[in-house]
Amino acid sequence: MKCTLAAFVLSAATASAFVPVPRAPLTSRLASTIEETEAPVNGNTNVAQTEDTSRDKVMTFSYDMSMEPAYEKPTYPGTGNGMSGDEGEYDIIVIGSGMGGLACSALSAKYGSRVLCLESHIKVGGSAHTFSRMHDGGKYSFEVGPSIFEGLDRPSLNPLRMIFDILEETMPVKTYKGLGYWTPEGYWRFPIGDRAAFDKLLMDQCGEDGPKAIREWNALRDRLKTLGGSTQAVALLNLRQDAGFLATTAGSLPFVLTHPDVFGDLSLTFDDLSKTVDEFVTVPFLRNFIDTMCIFCGFPAKGAMTAHLLYILERFFEEEAAFCVPIGGTCELGETLQRGLEKYGGKLQLNAHVDEILIEDGRAVGVRLKNGKIVKAKKAVVSNATPFDTVKLMPEQEGERKELTKWRSEIGKLPRHGAISHLFLAIDAEGLDLSHIQDPAHLIIQVSFPDENGTREYKSI
């Protein structure tokens, strides 16, 4: 059996970071390590190679997007050279095959549009894909993006499951009922689908503050109760950050009409979650737990939309709730949506990079590919690229729409949160007995968040 581990190291500019607990000054530990390992023992050069980091020394393989690789060592195609793609005309062109791009493409195809989805990468799915490496005859697979899901095992409020059902596609999953944490204080387990067990967790982890933690948790839930209830009654597919939210909910759902206070709290749905958490929660363990739940969407409570926790508040404590793992890896998410797209006549083109969105008379009419070919769109061009990348695809033109000019000028004001570096490690786990592990455990050693002044504050959970 082959086993893979992924360690995540985030830059100081990001919203959160997982870093080891410092047991000794970093410089002294590094010096000690180098002194002790100057002479490789038993031919082990793992440390020695860090002293000479030239490309030829450390590179065991190369990612090369050029047509003529410059290195003799094994070369992987990486993200591709982007030179594929053919001319043509479609109703809708979608740029990017992330979850949003694939969902848009597949649903548009189901409802009758001729759709082309263009992806620069050689794999579908955006961050939700898997890559493999062979070593000594063994295959090691690594998850690139998210690995924790809820509600994919049955019809549920999970928007992704809703789309699978609409497309009449299935994706087999395995389920588990908890999430294990290894921390400096020891191991503990978040039990999903069990309110009483969660209260016991708070009592066990918060000591004399246990009763206070339970009160604060319940107070937070009560404050967001109506909004949380609306996530049960309102399909998350309808959640929009504009007035269209009302049009897609109020006219069709009795819940909203019988709970008019939800309108007064709508602004909370898309506001920073930390504002509400700070009103009610003071116990450190509980605050850290909320941050780790929010990290699943990329931020701690500060920076996450309240809507993200609403789902957790309601769904994670329902008896039938369970975490889900796609059988075959996260790449199955994209491949399931791709099957739906192609089943309804849509087309996906990989390794096809879009260089420019073509604008005529104030509307997008197609794209120009990196290889120079033009693809026309009768109805729309949809971008699943980031806002920063999308605006670069539309060069400034004389007489362009004021909305586009304003968007271009304001895009630089959006907050940026730095980059994320993933260090992937693999072990040969053949013969290793893992039967005692109740749940797959995510190793969180220490969590740090920058404060308002950019200073890093360290918290152990």
Image (spheres, helix red, strand yellow):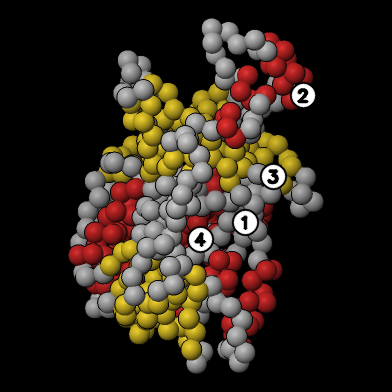
Q: Are marks 4 and 3 in contact (CB under 8 Å)?
A: no
Whole-percent x, y for residue 337 in the image? 29, 59
Q: Secondary structure at mark 4?
A: helix
Residue bearing mark 2: 27
Q: Are marks 4 and 2 in contact (CB under 8 Å)?
A: no
Question: On screen, 132 above or below 252?
Answer: above
Q: Secondary structure at mark 3?
A: loop
Whole-percent x, y for residue 85 in the image? 36, 67
The disc at residue 303 is 1
Q: Secondary structure at mark 1?
A: loop
Report the residue at 49% width, 31% height from top.
60
Q: Amino acid at mark 2?
A: Thr
The disc at residue 12 is 3
Residue found at the far top of this picture:
42
Dot 4 or dot 2: first in sequence order is: 2
Q: Residues within 10 Å of mark 4 (few under 14, many from 20)?
A: many
Residue found at the far right of this picture:
453
The disc at residue 316 is none
Q: Quadrant of the N terminus?
A: top left
From this viewpoint, is residue 278 visible? Answer: yes
Query: Spatial distance from mark 1 to mark 2, Cα to Cα?
Result: 33 Å
Dot 1 or dot 2: first in sequence order is: 2
Dot 2 or dot 3: first in sequence order is: 3
Report the residue at 56% width, 60% height from top.
305
Q: Are marks 2 and 3 in contact (CB under 8 Å)?
A: no
Q: Between 365 and 83, which is closer to the camera in this rendering?
A: 83
Q: Amino acid at mark 1?
A: Gly
Residue bearing mark 4: 307
